[in-house]
């Protein structure tokens, strides 16, 4: 059997969770926070990343509840039009997530590649 015939691999996902192991922020939520930070509104962020507004708003409120602090400041519409900005703590979360990925992505990717190679070799030898 050829390793190329088996199309599987190890992969990973990183998220921030509570001490009770309840997920708070993962890649999707980080994309959302970054889009809000870049566009200045939740509505524009939704257009950029294609998320559902109602579901995303609910998730953002859940995130704030789990964290125990605000990550967004919203200003309602009107003549000036509304906007949504990240709090300083919201910005710190994005920066910490990005910093983690920058520091450890190559290490995690190499570990996944090595584990995949080992697995495929083991599977191949079990068919010989």
Image: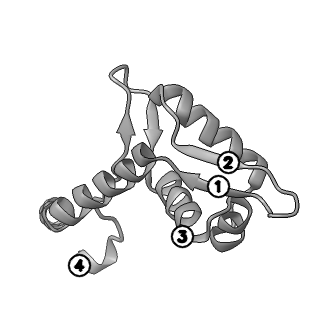
**Tags 4 and 3 touching, CB below 8 Å:** no
Label 3 vs 1, first from the N-terminus = 3
Alpha carbon separation for disc pair 1 and 4: 53 Å
Per the image, the residue denoted by label 1 is: 84
Label 4, residues with CA under 10 Å away: few <14, some 14-19, many ≥20: few
The numbered mark, 1 or 4, whose residue comes first in the sequence reads 4
Q: Nearer the viewer, mark 1 or mark 4?
A: 1
Q: Position of residue 38 (x, y in %)?
A: 54, 70
| CA distance separating discs 3 and 1 | 10 Å
User: Disc 4 and disc 2: Cα gap in Å?
Assistant: 56 Å
For the residue carrying disc 3, how many other residues have a C-alpha within 10 Å: few (<14), some (14-19), or many (20+)? few
Provide residue 68's location: percent of width, then percent of height.
Answer: 47, 25
Which residue is painted at 32% across and 22% down in the image? 19
The answer to which of marks 1 and 2 sits earlier in the sequence is: 2
Q: Circle 1: is it few (<14), some (14-19), or many (20+) Cα within 10 Å?
A: some
Residue in the image at 32% along x and 77% along y = 5
From this view, report whether residue 104 is shown above or below residue 7. above
Q: Look at the image and tell me whether residue 70 can be seen.
A: yes
**Residues under labels 2 and 3: Cα distance?**
15 Å
N-term-proximal mark, 2 vs 3: 3
- Kindly identify which residue carries mark 2: 74
Residue linked to disc 3: 38
């Amino acid at each position: 059997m050829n390793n190329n015939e088996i199309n599987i691999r190890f992969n990973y996902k990183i998220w921030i969770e509570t001490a009770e192991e309840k997920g708070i922020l993962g890649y999707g939520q980080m994309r959302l926070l970054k889009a809000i930070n870049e566009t200045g509104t939740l509505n524009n962020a939704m257009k950029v990343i294609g998320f559902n507004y109602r579901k995303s708003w609910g998730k953002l409120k859940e995130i704030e509840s789990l964290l125990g602090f605000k990550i967004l400041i919203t200003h309602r519409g009107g003549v000036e039009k509304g906007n949504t900005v990240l709090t300083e703590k919201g910005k710190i979360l994005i920066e910490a997530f990005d910093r983690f990925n920058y520091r450890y992505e190559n290490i995690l990717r190499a570990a996944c590649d090595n584990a995949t190679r080992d697995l495929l070799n083991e599977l191949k030898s079990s068919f010989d």
